[in-house]
């Protein structure tokens, strides 16, 4: 479907809610270790308020630098549990969204948004407690002309995000788990957690030995 200059590829498969919830219990660092420490979104994308954390099924959007028409058109495609993943060209000259779009995302059931670009209205977004991850902040508002694409693979921080991939984000940053690898990554992260617990126990034992 094409709305003049916005192309929409709707109808992708989404992981079920229980699977998303299982990922929600794990840190992004541990999930990264479970992915052989590869394919992790670059560290320039971080939470815009401390404590922001989200897991969801990717709804990818491609915009042109400084323009959010595709983001607005994507609102009607949001399903509960989606995480909006926006390639905004990493552009630092304009915010691709702010508190108003964040409220709308939440209204439609999105779990969060990751922007390879800049955003604004940080203080209100923090008050809303809606998880937003971005490269940075600028007060300059976006234009609304397009073009753009919705529901196509996009790059976020150097990593491919396909529609329906699992995206997890926390204080450390963002990771993308391909839908086809979900079960194996979940099994691997459970082993990583066991190793981490053992490493912590080692420190406790060392501390006791030195006391
Ligand atoms: O004006 C815009 O499109 C972006 C914005 O500030 C908001 O979503 O609150
Ligand atoms: Mg605003």
Image (cartoon, grey):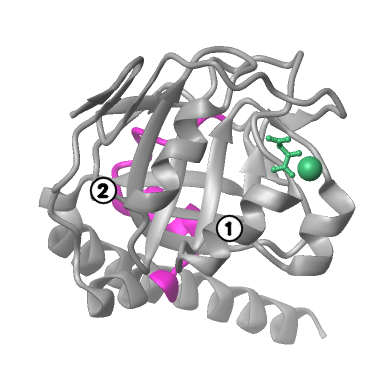
Residue 33 is one of the magenta-drawn residues: yes
Residue identifier under label 1: 104
Q: Secondary structure at mark 2?
A: loop
Residue 157 at x, y percent in the picture: 49, 26
- Sooner in the amino-acid sequence: mark 2 or mark 1: 1
User: Which corner quadrant of the image does residue 148 belong to?
Assistant: top left
Residue 140 at x, y percent in the picture: 83, 23
Q: Please tell me how crowded label 1 is: few (under 14), some (14-19), or many (20+) other residues with Cα within 10 Å.
A: some
Which quarter of the rendered picture does the C terminus lie within?
Answer: bottom right
Where are the magenta residues, as a range? 24-42
Which quarter of the rendered picture does the N terminus lie within?
Answer: top left
Tag 2–tag 1 contact (CB < 8 Å): no
Residue 58 is one of the magenta-drawn residues: no
**Is 118 situated above or below 19?**
above
Residue shown at the point (87%, 29%) measured from the top left: 139
Q: Residue 186 vs residue 91: left or right?
A: left
């Amino acid at each position: 479907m094409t709305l003049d200059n916005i192309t929409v590829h709707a109808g992708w498969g989404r992981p079920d809610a229980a699977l998303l919830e299982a990922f929600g219990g794990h840190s992004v660092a541990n999930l990264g270790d479970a992915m052989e420490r590869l394919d992790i979104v670059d560290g320039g994308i971080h939470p815009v308020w401390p404590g922001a954390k989200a897991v969801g099924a990717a709804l990818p959007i491609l915009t042109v630098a400084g323009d959010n028409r595709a983001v607005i058109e994507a609102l009607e495609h949001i399903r509960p549990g989606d995480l909006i993943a926006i390639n905004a060209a990493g552009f630092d000259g304009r915010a691709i969204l702010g508190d108003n779009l964040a409220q709308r995302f939440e209204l439609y059931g999105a779990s969060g948004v990751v922007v390879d670009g800049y955003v604004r209205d940080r203080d209100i977004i923090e008050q809303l407690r809606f998880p937003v991850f971005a490269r940075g902040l600028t007060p300059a508002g976006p234009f609304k002309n397009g073009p753009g694409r919705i529901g196509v693979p996009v790059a976020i921080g150097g990593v491919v995000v396909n529609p329906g991939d699992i995206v997890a984000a926390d204080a450390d940053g963002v990771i993308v788990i391909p839908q086809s690898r979900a079960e194996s990554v979940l099994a691997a992260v459970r082993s990583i957690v066991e190793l981490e617990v053992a490493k912590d126990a080692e420190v406790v034992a060392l501390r006791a030995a030195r006391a």
